[in-house]
Image (cartoon, grey):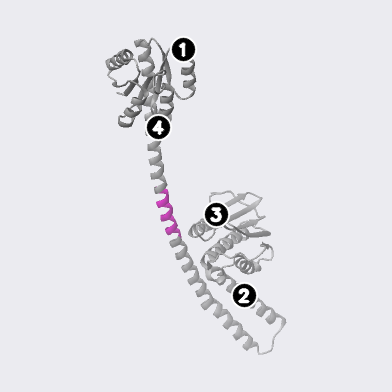
Amino acid sequence: MESILVVDDEKNIRITISEFLRERKYTVHLAEDALTAVELLRETPIDLVITDIMMPRMKGTDLLDHIREEYPDIKTILITGQASLENATASLRGGAFDYLQKPVTKNTLLSVVENACRILTLDRLNRRLMEENRQYRDHLEELVHRKSEHLFRLSRRIVTVQDDERRQIAHEIEDTIGKSLIALKLNLQSALDGRGSAESDALLEHLDAIIARTRTMASSLDPLSIASDDLVLVANRIREEFGCFPSCTIEIDAAAPVRLGDREQAATAGLIIREAVSNAIRHGRATLIKITIRSEDAGSTLEVRDNGCGFTAGKPGDERGIGILLMQERASAIRGALTIQAIPDEGCTVSLSIPGSA
């Protein structure tokens, strides 16, 4: 049961009220004036204070102010005579739960006290729920943090493995196919021995184009081929790689070099640009791609916007899903924020925000 403090300078009133309350099994404490109540509040847990307003040394309204400042969870009920009724109503606006007018009847007293106790119970329940919610939120945030860290490490591992495999394939293309084509060209030139014709010249030109395309393919597979801490330079290298697609124009909008201070971070961002450009050309059939790069106080941002056919996210059979997943993994690996907006028949925009160095 609640612990109730009764404060009144008239002994008979104190005794009468305490008897009414004890009949209902409340724990009751008594104080003959407000100053005594202040001392008792320091030492005793109290849930509800019932206090007279007009008392010597310290008024009940002053006690109310003290309780509101020092013990905001305690409810206060004022006892007032006709002369202090105005003070009582003013005190309700100042934080008192309710007031009782003298002479206090048993039924009225118990009714007001029961209402106050119900509110106290609800307040305690609300505080407990708020605390449980806080603990649950903290626990959830911790779980999310742990999961995010795990996914971050996993993403880095996936990207590392993929880059290693791409680099190995690039080297194999360069060392086998590329060198074989060059040897074939040299042998052909030697066999012709200056006896070239229009047909043989065209064949050699076509062979040169195949060799250039092979080098571009190998370069596009090797993440280190675009390595630089300058995102603008990285974007220009990527534009050169896709120069073999004359049907698509790639524009770069960047006012100045945008340096990240980390070659690996810039190379990873470059791989995202490369994947976005590749998707736009191969799947979106874009004729214009604009790469925008900006440096901001909080970090750097880049955007790849195309005028292609766009797509519907999650559409079955769409090969872009793998590329999008790869871009998301790479963005996670550098703690970047990646967003992709695609509208069917209107194109696609890939945006990446890269946090600055701490």
In the picture, the disc for residue 338 is: 3
Residue 32, picture quadrant: top left
Q: Amino acid at mark 1?
A: Ala
| Disc 4 residue type (three-letter) | Glu
Q: Nearer the viewer, residue 291 or 280?
A: 291
Q: Which residue is mark 1?
A: 83
Q: Residue furthest front?
A: 57
Q: Measure the C-alpha gap from mark 4 to mark 2.
A: 82 Å
Q: Residues within 10 Å of mark 4 (few under 14, many from 20)?
A: few
**Mark 4 against mark 2, which lies toward the viewer?**
4
Which quadrant, please, contains the N terminus?
top left
Left or right: residue 57 versus residue 163 is: left
Amino acid type indicated by mark 3: Leu
Mark 2 vs 3: CB contact within 8 A:
no
The x and y percentages for residue 112 are 39, 16
Q: Residue at x 43, y 53 (%)?
A: 148
Residue ID for mark 4: 70
Foreground mark, 3 or 4, reads 4
Q: Check residue 106 for magenta coloring.
A: no
